[in-house]
Image (cartoon, grey):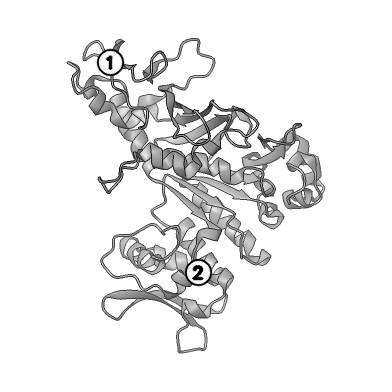
Amino acid sequence: MSVILSGLSAKNYKNLSIKQGIELNNLNIFIGSNGSGKSNFIAMLEFLKNCIIPISDESLSASPFENAVSALGGSKILDKSLKFPGTINFSYTFKNDSEFEKGFKLYIDIYAADKNSKVSIAEEYLSDALIMRHAPFFYYKYHDRKVGEGVISVWNDYHESSSHFENVYDVPTNTLGLTVLHDLLENSKNPPEKTPIYKARRRLIDYVRRWHFYKANYMNLKTIRTSEPKIGSGDIFLAPSGHNLAIVIENLIQQNIDFDESLNNAIKSILPGVRKFRPVRTGLMTVNLELYFEGISEPFYLNELSDGTVRMICWAVILLSPNLPSLLAIDEPELGIHPAWLPILAEWIKRASEKTQLIISTHSPDLLDSFTDSVSNVFAFSEDCDQAHFSITPLAEEKLIERINKGWELGDLYRTGDPLVGGWPW
């Protein structure tokens, strides 16, 4: 991966207290009780993606940012312990390849005047992400001195040895400035290609657009069972509802010769009696899924399988796909899954993290047991002293190693309310 999300922080955002930020890995497991902010944390990531996705219907009056912040909660995202007007801050840090070895930090301040008004961007900048740097290099800064104005860094020459700031005007407060670089430089003598941000911006936007989000309780099992999607769709990613499961499997098998075997091995690991799982073309150019068991000639279909089995098939397609998203976030994947299958699900998660970045939120001690060998990848949501906010802290392996060496698993410690793993899971 040429770009990876390496950290993020938030200030004055709902019930989360992560002002100092957290550093992320390829595999990230977040544990915490209901209401501790796990979904709020993932929503921060989804918000950034939604900010940069163009709106397909040009007649819509709202901008991508306005739609994104509305989905996040509008003015209600302001910490309830604060009074209006208030400002919410998000910052995202990205590591990059050798061409941009310094990485990036994207900083967004969101202003909420009152609980009934629309929110707007109060300040935005993109800088290099070097730590302990006295004066970081800014690719651009908007609204910091005057609303609607800002500066963009421009190379002094084509050798790209030094740069200067160029003023820009009419910077929108309802659109992420990262997405409108061309518009802001429209009347400039310097083309966008002459800005240090030009290459980095395209790469960053492409990376964030390929993030995918799944919530177990958003999957529509009835739709998954009854849907027969039409052939011709190019879908290679499962929709959040799961309705396109059959065509995604069909397309992935067509694209990758090994996926059929990989998926069948995964299904056999949860249903040892399975002989073959396959997509079949039915009706007027539609696709359905068939499951054959040893010793039975007639196929079974999804509407004959348990909820947990259907969910596991979905997770197998998502996690074992040869075409993984650049970041994959799954909220509570354990829902509806028998505890005996959770170690298998955990192995699929680990395999996927070898190829892309995973964000997994859970409050399942049974699932957590399987990550005892990955303590440094686990983060706990714990209640602050004010009992109104939650902090996110990586588990301290050096403090847990003695317990683990005695045979304790992380889920065991979680079940017993050990404060080193965030306390009581429920």
Q: Residue at x 61, y 44 (%)?
A: 38
**Residue under numbered circle 1:** 154
**Residue under numbered circle 2:** 221
Q: Position of residue 41 (x, y in %)?
A: 56, 41
Quarter of the N terminus within the rendering = top left
Q: Residue at x 41, y 59 (%)?
A: 238
Please tell me whether residue 144 is drawn above or below residue 386 in the rendered image. above
Q: Residue at x 41, y 15 (%)?
A: 137
* Closer mark to the observer between disc 1 and disc 2: 2
Three-letter amino acid code at disc 1?
Val
**Is there a contact, CB below 8 Å, between mark 1 and mark 2?**
no
Task: Give 52 or 401, whichever is nearer the viewer.
Answer: 52
Specify few, some or many for label 2: CA neighbours under 10 Å numbering under 14, 14-19, or 20 or more: many
Three-letter amino acid code at disc 2?
Leu
Image-quadrant location for residue 47: top left
Query: In terms of secondary structure, where does tag 2 sit?
Result: helix
Tally of numbered tags: 2
Task: Give 91 or 71, whichever is nearer the viewer.
Answer: 71
**In the shown orientation, is residue 45 left or right of residue 234?**
right
